[in-house]
């Protein structure tokens, strides 16, 4: 180490230590401690407010009908009962709707993410002919949509009524997701692509061996977005599925929670059990749990995936 380097290092260390001391002093003062306590209390209160509706629904799903009828509000049931869950799982319509929703969500997420990535990667190349025109069309589609009636007519003319593809293809490529993924591919170092081409990789080889392995955070993020959107989709099954045996979980949830359709439900679904108050809450819980289960596995990619494609245009 040269004399100049040692001098710089020696002078830099005390300055760094002084800065650390100032930071510690600022957070160890009474004002800093009060600020920390205020933040903890505020964030805890916000978390409890956000958690309260879910806890309320879960507790009422395990309560008896007598307590539900006599008490409008409680946070702990007098006695736990699984009658509501036994009721919905003993109904043939519910397991069928649950399996249908799981399969449609899994297949739909794969198809939508596959099509989005295949369109986003070429658009990330500045030398693509007509790139600006295509991107202008994507932005226009993000701001203006065709509307429900034109979309229904297109789906009908394509012969997709009473077809699960009608729940997937109309929203196969989300413009917002496309732009973020395109920006991510565009921000990848060009040296990686050049090195792959020197090794003899084709365009598809660069995409498959370089771009995709580096895009796991952004792909995991938008896979979650697509999956949640398909899982919670209510309008598409309502518009395109006329056969009640093909209904998804959201349609079943609407059927159970809507008092005006109970008699129709009993006529159309043999073996259908008239839902009580506890059953309504139980269906909501079961419809929410799958998303809560998968979210923690993708949470580590969530923030990184959102920011990494939105830093540069």
Image: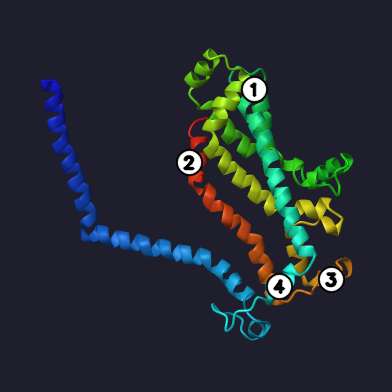
**Res. 18 image quadrant:** top left
The residues tagged by marks 4 and 2 sit, at their Cα atoms, a distance apart of 41 Å
Mark 3 = which residue?
A: 271
Residue in view at x 50 percent, y 26 percent = 188
Q: Is residue 14 left or right of residue 231?
A: left
Mark 1, other Cα within 10 Å: few <14 / some 14–19 / many ≥20: some
Up/down of 141 relative to 276, above or below: above
Mark 4 = which residue?
A: 86
Determine contact: label 4, label 1, CB under 8 Å. Answer: no
Mark 2 = which residue?
A: 304
Q: Which mark is residue 131?
A: 1
Q: Nearer the viewer, mark 4 or mark 1?
A: 4
Q: Is residue 130 left or right of residue 32?
A: right
Q: Nearer the viewer, mark 1 or mark 2?
A: 2
Determine contact: label 1, label 2, CB under 8 Å. Answer: no
The picture places residue 170, in percent across and down from the top left corner, at: 76, 41
Q: Nearer the viewer, mark 4 or mark 2?
A: 4
Up/down of 281 relative to 72, above or below: above
Up/down of 151 relative to 189, above or below: below
Mark closest to the chain's N terminus, 3 or 4: 4
**Res. 152 image quadrant:** top right
- Could you tell me which secondary element the residue under label 4 belongs to? helix
Residue in view at x 76 percent, y 47 percent = 167
């Amino acid at each position: 180490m040269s004399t100049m380097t040692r001098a710089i290092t020696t002078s830099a260390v005390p300055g760094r230590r002084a800065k650390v001391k100032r930071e510690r002093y600022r957070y160890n003062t009474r004002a800093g401690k009060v600020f920390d306590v205020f933040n903890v209390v505020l964030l805890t209160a916000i978390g409890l407010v956000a958690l309260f509706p879910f806890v309320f629904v879960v507790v009422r799903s395990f309560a008896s009908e007598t307590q539900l009828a006599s008490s409008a509000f409680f946070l702990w049931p007098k006695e736990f009962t699984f009658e509501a869950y036994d009721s919905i799982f003993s109904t043939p319509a519910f397991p069928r709707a649950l399996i249908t929703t799981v399969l449609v969500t899994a297949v739909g997420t794969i198809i939508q993410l596959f099509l989005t990535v295949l369109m986003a990667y070429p658009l990330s190349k500045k030398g693509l002919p007509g790139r600006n025109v295509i991107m202008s069309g994507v932005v226009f589609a993000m701001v203006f949509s065709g509307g429900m009636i034109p979309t229904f007519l297109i789906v009908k003319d394509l012969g997709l009524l009473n077809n699960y593809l009608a729940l997937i293809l109309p929203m196969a490529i989300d413009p917002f997701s496309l732009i973020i993924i395109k920006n991510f591919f565009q921000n990848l170092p060009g040296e990686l692509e050049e090195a792959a081409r020197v090794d003899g990789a084709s365009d598809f080889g660069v995409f498959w061996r370089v771009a995709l392995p580096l895009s796991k955070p952004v792909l995991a993020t938008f896979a979650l977005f697509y999956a949640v959107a398909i899982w919670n989709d209510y309008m598409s099954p309502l518009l395109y599925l006329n056969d009640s045996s093909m209904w998804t979980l959201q349609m079943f949830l609407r059927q159970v929670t809507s008092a005006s359709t109970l008699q129709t439900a009993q006529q159309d679904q043999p073996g259908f059990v008239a839902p009580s108050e506890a059953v309504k809450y139980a269906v909501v819980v079961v419809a929410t749990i799958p998303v809560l289960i998968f979210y923690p596995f993708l949470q580590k990619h969530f923030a990184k995936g959102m920011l990494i494609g939105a830093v540069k245009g």
